[in-house]
Amino acid sequence: MGDNPDFDDKEIKEEKNCLDLGKTNPSKSVDLEEQIECTSISNEDQDNRPTTTTRLYKRRWVMVCLFSCYSLCNAFQWIQYGIINNIFMKFYNVDSFTIDWMSMVYMLTYIPFIWPVSWLLDKKGLRLIALMATAINCLGTWIKVASVRPNLFWVTMLGQFAGSLSQVFILGMPSRLASVWFGSEEVSTACSIGVFGNQLGIAIGFLVPPILVPNVDNIDELAYHISIMFYITAGVATVIFILVVFMFQEKPEIPPTLAQVQARSIPPEQYSYMASILRLLHNLPFMLLVISYGLNVGCFYAVSTLLNRMIIEHYPGEEVNAGRIGLTIVIAGMVGSLICGIWLDKTKTYKQTTLAVYLLSFVGMVVYAFTLNLGHLWVVFVMSGALGFFMTGYLPLGFEFAVELTFPECEGTSSGLLNCSAQIFGIIFTIGQGKIIEHFGTFAGNIFLCVFLFIGTIMTAFIKSDLRRQKANHLAETQAASKQAGISPPATLKEVKV
């Protein structure tokens, strides 16, 4: 595939020598332990430099960037209706709750479809999932192009449904992609970059629609502006689909970490998707994380979907600033995501970091609730940025903490359960907060979310920090070092329950 590994010619020769060890004795298959031993054998003829069966490819950055691009394109469509809720209400002559469903359909579609998609990810791998995600997303954007008439709301809803179906193939991939392609010291950063693309798409979805589609009274002029937005989206989605077809690769030929060496050593016939689901459901720390993750991200979905209504209620005529406030929330969250990812790679403090960020998300939501109605937009901007930094920054933390708690289960399965929880709570919170705002105002609606964020913080505090992936990597490294020193290793990977 034209990869350019981050190794010089000498290291490539060493790797070949290491792999050739299995060829010199064909009567013995090279099992996992022999591969790990191979990673630490010193070669006296080559400056005593250790050979390795793990390898990092420069192409890994292409993979994560491609994923971020098509995740961005899909996430943009999630919020493009909600942020100009009042304009689409006027154009299609529907009520606000109907337009809210243009966002909530993303959440509803995810719940039944995540199970077959997770199974496909387990059985068929990353490339097929990437192709299906970009193809369905591209189809949905062109359906929307054909929907720019006031009597064709059902067509635009069909296009949005296609986008929501594409999202099912996207949300669970960041942690899986990071584990398959990236080293143990950069896997959390890579996951953050994957989440970064999705958040950037939401940010653009907050910023661009109010600019491209002004609130004009002439329906024909409004149709023209909406069609411009839909054509741009379709063009971008088409280009991304073509890039994925020609450039996206399933996995590196040589795994990047010893944990991946172990994961690849499990025969496919020994893996059962349903058994994996049952093991996850019986994993108490993980299930606590599933619920607490759903509460946090569900609150974020509700705030994002209803942001236009909340801002317009206190600041009439400020549709563009509503979009900018949404942009502020997500941009701050993107910074938070990257900082949290880098922090995790440096410190491996998954439980402590997750709890701290969750607590600060709760505090940010409380302050946002009390300052929204003060009448000063600059205060709303500042508090929205603080809220977004922690609430959106929590996303990659949840993914990576889940992988640690559930290794060696498939990352797509654990991520799928997290996202399923988020979609369920997102629908509940969006409908609940919307009704509360309608009857009691925005302050009561935001306090409603604060209560659940407080509950999520308490639940996070009770999660046992069982870092199984870290243990697997440490065990493999210890075993390899022991064999190199001629000492009997303390245990084998096969003897230790991970």
Image (tube, rainbow, N blue to C red):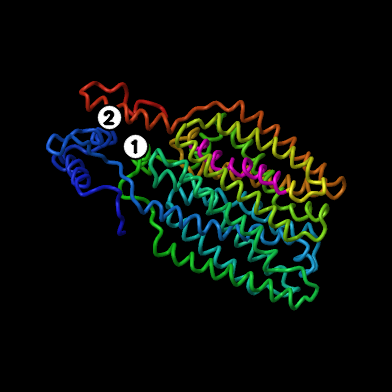
Check contact, mark 2 vs mark 1: CB within 8 A. yes
The amino acid type, in three-letter code, at marker 1 is Leu
Residue 383 is a magenta residue? yes
Q: CA distance from mark 2 to mark 1?
A: 10 Å
Q: Is residue 115 left or right of residue 369?
A: left
Pick out the residue farthest to the bottom: 220
The image shows residue 496, relative to residue 448, as above or below, that is above
Q: Which residue is mark 2?
A: 480
Residue 86 is a magenta residue? no
| Mark 1 crowd level (few <14, some 14–19, many ≥20, 10 Å Cα) | many
Q: Main secondary structure of the magenta part?
A: helix
Q: Which residue is mark 1?
A: 258
- Residue at position x 69%, y 43% from top? 299
Quarter of the image where the N terminus is located: bottom left
Quarter of the image where the C terminus is located: top left
The amino acid type, in three-letter code, at marker 2 is Ala
Across and down, in percent, residue 285 comes to 56, 29
- Badge 1 marks a residue whose secondary structure is helix
| Circle nearer the N terminus (2, 1) | 1
Q: Which mark is residue 284?
A: none
Q: Which residues are magenta?
A: 381-403
- Badge 2 marks a residue whose secondary structure is helix
| Mark 2 crowd level (few <14, some 14–19, many ≥20, 10 Å Cα) | many
18 and 27: which one is in front?
18
- Residue at position x 35%, y 43% from top? 256
